[in-house]
Image (cartoon, rainbow, N blue to C red):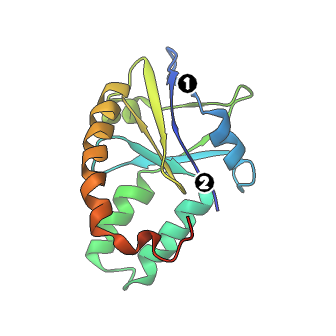
């Protein structure tokens, strides 16, 4: 399983190219696709992405819950899968973010990559700092509500 960790802020050039962090590229090296797949996150306003295998598992889980003709499945599939973009790495390890994706996420001169385990997010750096601050406060409460998360660990 892919494991994306930490966060990195990289420059976006005039053509919309951004270097994917080296540790993320290393994590993706075993993927069946030489790049990343991105889609618009519904909440918060950023991009989410990962290896092809993550999206394949997502699609399988989405369609295994009910009929593939269920209208609620259609809306989610259209939002994520139909709106996804497969981005190949160039020789320098960069991908080109479409104008539409950059506009959606408010990404201009820099982009922040935030690892979330099997997937990652790409943010406008200022928006990410605001989101991160709110999530740290929320995590204090959420960890109290999930006592079994570390149950049985010897750590």
**Secondary structure at numbered mark 2:** loop
Q: Quadrant of residue 112?
A: top left
- Check residue 3 in the rendering and tell me which mark sits there, or answer none: 2
Total numbered labels? 2
Mark 2 surroundings: few (<14), some (14-19) or many (≥20) residues within 10 A: some
- Check residue 101 in the rendering and tell me which mark sits there, or answer none: none
Return the disc, 1 or 2, that comes first in the chain's sequence: 2
Percent x, y for residue 28? 68, 48
Percent x, y for residue 78? 36, 60
Looking at the image, is mark 1 or mark 2 nearer the viewer? 2
Q: Quadrant of residue 104?
A: top left
Residue 34 visible within the image? no
Instruction: Report the front residue among 10 and 147.
Output: 147
In the displayed structure, would residue 79 be above or below residue 14?
below
Q: Quadrant of residue 30?
A: bottom right
Tell me which residue sits at (40%, 57%) in the image. Answer: 80
Percent x, y for residue 18? 55, 26
* Label 1 sits on residue: 17
Tell me which residue sits at (61%, 33%) in the image. Answer: 21
Instruction: Report the front residue among 110 and 32.
Output: 110
Q: Would residue 154 be found to the left or right of residue 140 on screen?
A: right
Tell me which residue sits at (72%, 56%) in the image. Answer: 32
Residue 94 visible within the image? yes
Residue lying farthest front? 154
Percent x, y for residue 86? 57, 46
Residue lying farthest bottom? 66
């Amino acid at each position: 399983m892919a494991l994306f960790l930490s966060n990195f802020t990289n420059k976006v050039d005039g053509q919309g190219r951004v270097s994917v962090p080296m540790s993320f590229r290393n994590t993706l090296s075993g993927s069946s696709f030489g790049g990343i797949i991105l889609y618009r996150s519904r909440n918060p306003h950023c991009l989410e992405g990962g290896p092809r295998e993550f999206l394949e598992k997502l699609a399988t889980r989405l369609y295994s819950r009910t009929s593939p003709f269920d209208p609620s499945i259609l809306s989610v599939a259209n939002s994520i899968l139909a709106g996804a973009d497969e981005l190949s790495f160039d020789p320098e390890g960069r991908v080109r973010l479409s104008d539409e994706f950059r506009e959606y996420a408010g990404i201009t001169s820099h982009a922040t990559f935030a690892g979330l385990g099997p997937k990652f997010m790409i943010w406008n750096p200022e928006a990410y700092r605001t989101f991160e601050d709110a999530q740290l406060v929320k995590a204090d409460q959420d960890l109290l509500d999930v006592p079994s998360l570390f149950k049985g660990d010897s750590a």
